Structure formats: C-alpha cells, structure tokens
Image: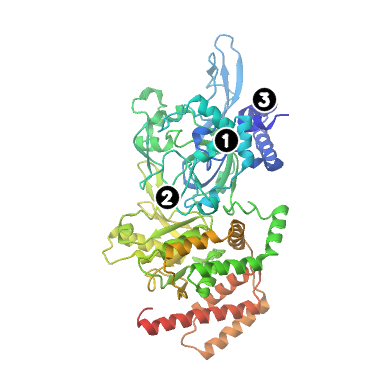
Amino acid sequence: MPCVADWLNNPFSIVQGIFAQNVPNSDWEKKVTEYFKEKLKENNATNWVPSLNDVPVHYLKPNSLVKFRCMVQDMFDPEFYMGVYETVDPNTNARVLHFGKYRDVAECGPQQEIDLNSTQTVTSERQTFYCVPVPGESAWSVVVLNPQFYAYISANQARVSPSTSYTPSRHKRSYEEDEDMDLHPSKQKEQHMGNSSGGDIHGCVEPKRLETEASAGHHLISPNCSPPLDLNFPLPGEKGPACLVKVYESWDSFKVNDVLEVYGILSVDPVLSIVNNEERDSSALDPMECMDTAEEQRVRSPPASLVPRIHVILAQKLQHINPLLPACLNEEESKTFVSNFMSELSPVRAELLGFLTHALLGDSLAAEYLILHLISTVYARRDVLPLGKFTVNLSGCPRNSIFTEHIYRIIQQLVPASYRLQMTIENMNHSRFIPHKDYAANRLVSGVLQLASNTSLVVDETQLEQGQLDTTGVHNVTALGNLITWQKVDYDFNYHQMEFPCNINVLITSEGRSLLPSDCQVHLQPQIIPPNMEEYMNSLLTAVLPSVLNKFRIYLSLLRLLDYSISDEVTKAVEEDFVEMRKNDPESITADDLHRTLLVARFLSLSAGQTTLSRERWLRAKQLEALRKARLQQQTCVNGNEL
C-alpha cells in the first residue's frame, strides 16, 4: 500500500498505477478521484498537504500534491488536451499508452515519439480558471499554524530547494543553509512570515507568499516577460500567488468570484513560459496558437514561476473562509461543533457587545447595530431585491481622525476578509472599481469591487473633501451605490454590461449623513473621549485574550450561516402591531420602517442563537429602532439640516 509520501510527494505514481491497472476502462479517472478523496479523509490528512497560500511556490516540490484557497477572478475558454495518447519507439516499434490528464506537457521517452494518428488517442476537455488569493483575507485567517505540517516537511523532505523555474531576486542560500533549514523548519517559517498592518495582534502575522509584492498596479517583473506582468489582483498591494487552476470535472458548478479550495498537482515546468520569451523561435509554436494575439498568449501562458498551474483532483466551493469553523456544517461532526458553541452563545455575545462598546467609545447602541451588521447576509433574492442586506451608516465619526482607521483594524481582527476604501476625490477619480473586459488580451481586468462573498467593505467617507469628480469618479460612486442598494456590480464588457450579484457587508463611516445610500443610519454618541486615541485602541486589542477573540470570530461567521424563519402566529402579531403603529403615527411610520424593523428583529434573534422570531425579540427590535430614531431626531434639532 502506498505510504503518505507517495501520494503527497509523487501523486503521478499513484495515478500511473491506477491508469495501468484499469486501462482501457474509462473508470480509471473516477478511481483516481476516489483514491485521493479517501486519503484526505484519513487522520486530518488535509493538514499535511502544503498550501500555496502559506508556502512560496519555489519551496514546493514540482508535481507534488498541493492545496490552494482562492477566488475565481476569471475563467478562460475550455481547452482540449490528449487524455490518453500512445507513444511508439521507431527502432523496436514498441507502443506504450500514457495518460495526459493532470499534465501540461506530454510525457515521452528519449527514444519515443507520440503517434498522433493512433486509434488509442482520447481527446478530452478541461476548464482553466484564473484564481487569486481571497481579496482582503485577514492575517489571522491566513495564518493557522500547523506544527504537524512543518514536522512532516522536515522528516520527509517535501520542501526542496528552489526549482529551476524560479529566479529569486535575492542571493541564493548555500547548500549548508538549506540543510540547516531542513533540520530547523521553524527558521524557514520565520523567514517567510511578515507583519501586515495590525497583523501583530496575538501573533497574527501574514505569510510572505511571494518574494515580490504586487505594487499598486499589481505589476511584477519577470525575467521571461516584458513588459511587466499584471497579476490582476482586485485590491492594491495584495500578496500571494495567482494560479491557473485546471478543472477536469463539474466545472459548470464554479463561476467567477466563487471561493474554492482545490487539491491538485503543482505544475511549474519552465516550458510553460515559452510564449513569454521574446527570443523564442516562432516555429516552435503550434500554428493554431499563433492565431491568438500576443497579449492573449501572455495571459494564457504567464511564467510558471509567478503563475503556477494546479491540475485539480478535488475541488469544493467554500461556504465560508473562517478556518476556525468546520468547512461543511452539514456533516455530523460539524453539527456537534455547532451545538457545543451555541450552548455558550450568550456570554460570547455579551463579551463581544462590551468589546465593541469600548471600541465605539462607550456607545452601546452603536455596538448593538454593529453586531447586527456583521452577522447580516443576503439570504435570498426576490426579483431584483436582495433580502438580508444591512448596510449601516455610522455617522458622527470625527473628521480626518484615526478613529475610523482603528475601527477598521478591529473589524479586520473579527472577520475573515475585509477592505477599507478611503473615499477621497483622488481615489474616486483614479481607482478602478468596476472590472472590465479586455478583448485584446481576452481577459477580465479586475477592479476593487470584485470581492468574495461576505467580505466586509468599510467605506471611510470622513476622508472626503471638496473637489470635482470626473467621469471615472461618477461611475465609481454610482457603482458603490448599486452595490449597496442592489448587491450587484455591473461589469463592463465594452458593448454591454453584465450583472454580477454579490453579498458584501458595507459599513460607511462618515461625519454627517453619508452621500451613499444605506439601510440604517446610526449616529455615534461617544461617552468617553480618550486623550490618546491610538493608545486607547491598541490597548483594547491587546487586552482581549486570543481564545476570546477566536470565539468572537466563530460567533460572527457561524450566525451568518444559520437558517431563520417566522411562524404564522408571530407574522400575524407583527402585522397587527404595525397597523397599530400606523394608526398612532401615520406620518412617520412607513413600509420601509416595517422592513427595517423586521431586519433588526431577524439579526437580533440570530445574535441570540434563536432561529425563529419571538415576541420578546420583536419588542426589543422596536425599542432599538426607537432609540436610534430619537438620537437622529436629536441630532437634527442640534444641527438643523444635518440629516
């Protein structure tokens, strides 16, 4: 029976064995998938598989099994390949069958030639996705340290010295240094981990997933590629490898912006970069490939050292990206985890409310609404209306203060993926918000609003000053408004626009009422004014225990995934209550108020671990709404037309 090193370090040997035993039976492909699926179920074997999210590609063994947690940024046209092909030895006329699946380059011995006219040849189809690390993924989410994995590397030499397909920008280590790294894998770990902003809280440091960091324009200079290669990350300053993920089965179930976890065979063959070599012999290319433009060739065949290929054996679409939660909540073991956590939900909520109250300078009402916002999610769509979105406008924030920056840092420590969008005239006029199709390169060029589901987007409007929006700025503001109102982004395909539905939690921080639409405005009323805001916020983060912080993270992610319903009895009671409210105050109570109060009641119930609406939660929701409105009314009286 193959040992773990065989299927992990040399998966091709496993595939070859199954292929040889089952050819010409077409079931060999299914048996390969079943074999690896069973192996990954054994003793948390998924923890042994190196991740491209954590380990630089040049430290991974070519043709080994790897995993990658990623977002589908673009999808290319399906490609044909030789699933099975036959080679012949011209001297002996001996024939050998080979599999082409999971390979970029056909394997052929030195005395063998591929028989293109063989009747044994099977032409198959695969789909290529261009995948990037999840945009805005938080440092704590990325770094879930696994001592077993590093122990395995040390014992089994899974990590090798840098491959020939990678040209490091630093000096190479000596053999002795490499040997030292093998004996002390912690040194390797330290060398490839770097701090990100706010990432030093409780040891959360972001791994250095690539030697080179993308600049604001996402450009990386490759020795085989000129001009610089654009890795097409949606957010500026992102790090990590982009990958060409080649899927062989059920690719119709995946679409752009889906978050996937894939297990497959790593391919970094230098031959894959041939089309990027300006000095290449054009005759070496297939005539059909030459029909593509040079730009399209660069996109389809970037240097493998910068954009490795993964040939997928197993892939799944992720419900969430919180590593503290089970990947699938429907399994029996996961149900036990959920049940155990729900039993201690009440104290976790109380602690989180206290934590956020301190963060919001003593404002407990704003903290309540922030919790409701953080667990909100689009649970359904009725025609064009997204149900469950809860965009909060936190007004009353100090102008040009570091307060909003620190609020974002706290949110960043609580959610798996987030981004802070500073709403300045400069950013509005010069940033690329909306993804658009580049027909010359035949690819989707990313934009800031190409985000994974359940990403927290914090729009900082306190940075906005007087100025003139140009055409780009107007389009960007419009796109932000459409995202908030309809939870969709209209991607620009030049001749038409295509709607891409999304599920993004938007929090707007502003001084007065936001220029952008929102579902709920909460005016901040600080109860304390710390003399040193930065020191106050830093002490708040360092004071909370890591175990408590992890409970907050589980709490916010788990409650988003719970089902919720309202019984017929409660529905009738709510309707009667609303009719009474309209009678008492017909001028100010509208259908929008009913919709918002129902949303507040929904998230209040879920925040307490209740999946149905009770009379008590409905009354509490009405009370919160009354307090919020009274505060806004008071602000109107103070500032006149503030609202």
N-terminal label among 3 and 2: 3
Mark 1 closeness class: few <14, some 14–19, many ≥20 residues within 10 Å: many
Mark 2 closeness class: few <14, some 14–19, many ≥20 residues within 10 Å: many
Mark 3 closeness class: few <14, some 14–19, many ≥20 residues within 10 Å: some
Q: Amino acid at mark 3?
A: Ala
Q: Amino acid at mark 1?
A: Pro
Q: Quadrant of the N terminus?
A: top right
Give the residue displayed 47% in from the left and 52% down from the top: 136
Most foreground residue, 173 or 584: 173
Most foreground residue, 231 or 407: 407
Query: At numbered mark 2, what does the secondary structure look like: helix, strand or loop?
Result: loop
The alpha-carbon separation of the residues under discs 1 and 3 comes to 37 Å
Residue occupied by mark 3:
20
Residue occupied by mark 1:
185
Left or right: 225, with 507 as reference point = left
Give the residue displayed 57% in from the left and 35% down from the top: 185
Residue occupied by mark 2:
234
Q: Between label 3 and label 2, give the one nearer the viewer.
A: 2
